[in-house]
Amino acid sequence: MELAHFLPYRLSVLTHNISQSIAVIYSSRFDIGIQEWRIIANLGNKKFLSANEIGEHVNLDKVQMSRAISKLMKKGLVKRTLDKIDKRKSSLRLSAKGLRLYEEIVPMALQREKQLLTALSRDEQLQFETILCKLECKALELNSLPLE
C-alpha cells in the first residue's frame, strides 16, 4: 500500500497539518494545546456538556479527555458541576475566563481557515464541503457494519 494514495492516511496528515497551523496561533500565546482547544471550542458552542459528550466530538480517549480537562480546570478555564442526584455524573462549562479566551481565539482560527481556503475556488469550496459530508456519512455507516 502506498500511504501517499491512501485516503484515510492523507486525511489524517491534512487534519494534523491544519490543526498545527491553527495551534501556532494559540499555543504560545495562550499556553493551551490542541486537545485543550478542542474542548474549549466545544464548550464555547454549548452551555453545559458532559465529558462523554465532548469526547464524541473531539475524538479523544478517556485518558486524554481527563488530562485535558484537568489542565483546563487548573488554569481556571473550565468549571465542573456535579449532578445533584447522581454524583458520578457531571457537566462542564467554560468559566468567564474560558469564555473570554474562546472569544479571543475564534476570530483568529476563522481567519486561519479563511487563509487555508484561498487554495480553493468558491466552487471547489462548495464541492469540498459536499464531499466531506458524504465521506462523514459513509464513514459513520461503515462503523456500524461488521468486518467482512
Image (tube, rainbow, N blue to C red):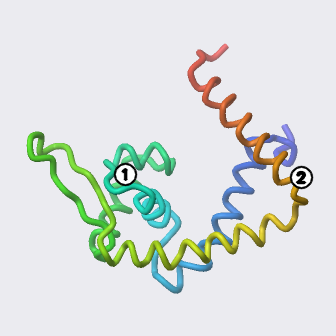
Which numbered tag is attached to residue 126? Answer: none
In the picture as drawn, the residue positioned furthest to the left comes out as 85
Coordinates of residue 121 in the picture (x, y in percent)? 90, 60
Which quadrant would residue 144 be assigned to in this image?
A: top right
Q: Which residue is mark 2?
A: 123
- Figure check: 25 above or below 45: below
Q: Is residue 4 left or right of residue 74?
A: right
Mark 1 Cα shell of 10 Å, populated few (<14), some (14-19), many (≥20): few
In the picture as drawn, the residue positioned furthest to the bottom comes out as 29
Which numbered tag is attached to residue 63? Answer: 1
State the residue at coordinates (45%, 57%). 42
Mark 2 Cα shell of 10 Å, populated few (<14), some (14-19), many (≥20): few
Which element carries disc 2, helix, strand or loop?
Answer: helix
Pair 1/2: label in front: 2
Q: Is residue 7 left or right of residue 113?
A: right
Q: Which part of the image, by quadrant, shows the N terminus?
A: top right
From mark 1 to mark 2, how far is it between C-alphas?
A: 41 Å
State the residue at coordinates (49%, 47%). 57
Which element carries disc 1, helix, strand or loop?
Answer: helix
Residue kind at label 2, given as amino acid type: Asp
